[in-house]
Image (tube, helix red, strand yellow):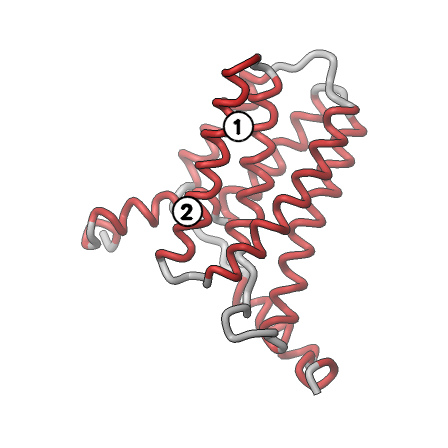
């Protein structure tokens, strides 16, 4: 009801940004893990866990630190929507691009990159994050994505059945889009509890 009372442009921005909420991307990350295991690629699955840990852990740790010790006023909370969205949707784009050839592959990559960037832009337009926080989120997600991409290309499953994967992805997005998992307040409390300002900020 609240969404319907907002201007159409803002509704579109919110709908787009919600695609990268933790309530959506976390189940998608778990789905990718199970798919890699089902495709009998345990090494790729391990590297996926490493990439997700780097992305979530890096974002969370920087949030905790910057809450108390911002380097600049524009950088207090790296965008988790952007970092996790980059990793998860970037991986799905990687899977899709890997099954196409020539110009279609580049088209998939270009459209996918535009989609990820559009999510990042919504965080700024909705005043959820500053440009610096979004850029840092993009950096974290991109680093994690590059790490997984290199591992996946080395340990790619011999048989790859993408139909079940993308079916589950579609179901998750349809069922969970619009839901929220708020981790920001929890991380803020951790920051205050640890007393980072006293220890590191002088």
Which tag, 1 or 2, sits closer to the chain's start? 2
| Vertical comparison of 189 with 149: above or below | below
The percent position of residue 141, horizontal first and vertical second, equals 61, 46
Q: Secondary structure at mark 1?
A: helix
Q: Compare residues 111 and 14 and report the one nearer the observer.
A: 111
Residue at the image position 71 percent from the left and 19 percent from the top = 39
Badge 2, how many Cα within 10 Å: few under 14, some, many 20+? many
Q: Residue at x 57, y 21 (%)?
A: 97
User: Does residue 151 sit above or below 136 in this rendering?
Assistant: above
The C terminus - image quarter: bottom right
- Residue at which label 1 appears: 109
Q: Mark 1 or 2, which is nearer the eye?
A: 1
Question: What numbered label is drawn on residue 100?
Answer: none
Which residue is the site of mark 2? 18
Q: Residue at x 34, y 44 (%)?
A: 15
In the picture, measured across the screen, residue 35 lies left or right of residue 11, that is right
Contact, CB < 8 Å: mark 1 with mark 2? no
Please report the residue visible at 53 percent of the width from the left and 22 percent of the height from the top. Answer: 106
């Amino acid at each position: 009801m609240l969404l319907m009372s907002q201007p159409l442009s803002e509704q579109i921005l919110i709908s787009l940004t919600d695609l990268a909420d933790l309530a959506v991307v976390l189940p998608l990350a778990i789905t990718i893990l199970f798919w890699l295991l089902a495709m009998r690629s345990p090494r790729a699955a391990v590297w996926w866990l490493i990439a997700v840990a780097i992305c979530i852990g890096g974002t969370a740790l920087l949030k905790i630190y910057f809450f108390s010790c911002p380097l600049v006023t524009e950088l207090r909370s790296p965008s988790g929507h952007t970092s996790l969205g980059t990793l998860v949707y970037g991986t799905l784009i990687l899977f899709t691009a890997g099954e196409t050839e020539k110009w279609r592959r580049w088209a998939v990559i270009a459209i996918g990159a535009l989609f990820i960037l559009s999510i990042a832009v919504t965080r700024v337009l909705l005043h959820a994050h500053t440009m610096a926080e979004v850029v840092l989120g993009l950096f974290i997600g991109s680093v994690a994505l590059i790490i997984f991409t290199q591992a996946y290309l080395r340990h790619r499953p011999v048989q790859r059945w993408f139909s079940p994967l993308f079916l589950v992805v579609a179901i998750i997005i349809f069922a969970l889009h619009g839901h929220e998992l708020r981790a920001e307040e929890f991380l803020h409390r951790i920051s205050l509890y640890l007393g980072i300002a006293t220890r590191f900020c002088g």
